[in-house]
Amino acid sequence: DTGVSQNPRHKITKRGQNVTFRCDPISEHNRLYWYRQTLGQGPEFLTYFQNEAQLEKSRLLSDRFSAERPKGSFSTLEIQRTEQGDSAMYLCATSDRGSTDTQYFGPGTRLTVL
Amino acid sequence: QKEVEQNSGPLSVPEGAIASLNCTYSDRGSQSFFWYRQYSGKSPELIMFIYSNGDKEDGRFTAQLNKASQYVSLLIRDSQPSDSATYLCAVNPSSGSARQLTFGSGTQLTVLP
C-alpha cells in the first residue's frame, strides 16, 4: 500500500453515461498525475496537477474528460458520455517536490463501458 | 519509433537464475529512469530508480544505466516465482513543466519453480 487511494476500484457503466473517479494522494505530496492503462500497454499520461493547478494535459484527454483538484488535496477525473474505447484502468500517481520526483501509484479504478 | 521500448517477452527463467530486462529510450535528454513491477490486475509498484550512469543495487535488484547508448536495464538475482510479473520501464522527459513518466509496454517475466 503506497498511501495513495482511489475510488471506486471498479466501475461498470453503459455507453453514454458519465462517470467520476476520485484519487486521494499521500498527504505531503503536492504533485498528482492521472494515467490510463489498457491491456498489454504501459500507462499513458493524461494530466498533471501541482497543488490545485492543472499544469499539463495530454492530447489523449479529449473534451469529454475533465479533471480537478480543488484544494490541492484529492482529485477527481470525470468522463462524460462514455464510449467503449474508454474502458481501461485509470491510475493516479503522486509525488513530492523533491528532486527524485518519484511517483507512487494508487490501486487504480477499472472502468468497463458496456 | 516508440519513445520507450522494451521486449514484450514473455521471458522465462528458472528459479534462482538471473533475469535480465532491457529498455531503450529515444529522448537523449532524459534525466531519470524508473522500474516498476506490475502484477496482473494490480497497479504499478516502484522497484527502483536511477539517475546516474552505472549500476545501482538494491537487494536482489540492480539497475544499470548507459546514457550514451540510451539504455537502461534491470537485473534480478536469485529470481523467485513471486517475481513473476510485468516489469515496466519508465522515463522522465527532459523538458516541460510536468514530470510525467513515459512508459514502455512492459516485459512479462515468468520464474519457473
Image (cartoon, rainbow, N blue to C red):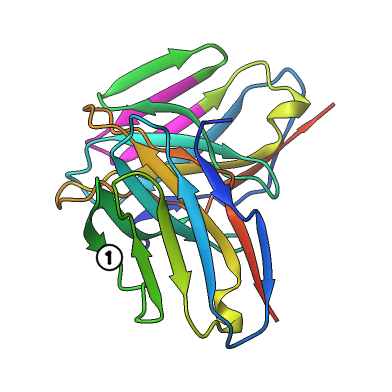
Taking the view exactly as shown, the residue that stands out farthest to the top is B59
Q: How many marks?
A: 1
Residue A80, how many percent across, how many down?
A: 47, 80
Question: Circle 1 is placed at which residue position?
Answer: A57
Q: Nearer the viewer, residue A23 or B15?
A: A23
Q: Secondary structure at mark 1?
A: strand
| Majority SS type along the magenta span | strand
Residue A85, how many percent across, how many down?
A: 56, 80
Residue A23 visible in image: yes
Q: Nearer the viewer, residue A29 or B97?
A: A29
Q: Nearer the viewer, residue B7 or B40?
A: B40
The C terminus of chain A sits in image quarter? bottom right
Residue B34, how many percent across, how many down?
A: 40, 35
Which stretch appears magenta? B62-74
Instruction: Please name the amino acid that badge 1 sits on.
Output: Lys
Asked where in the image residue A60 lies, by quadrant, the reply is bottom left
Residue A81, how many percent across, how many down?
A: 51, 85
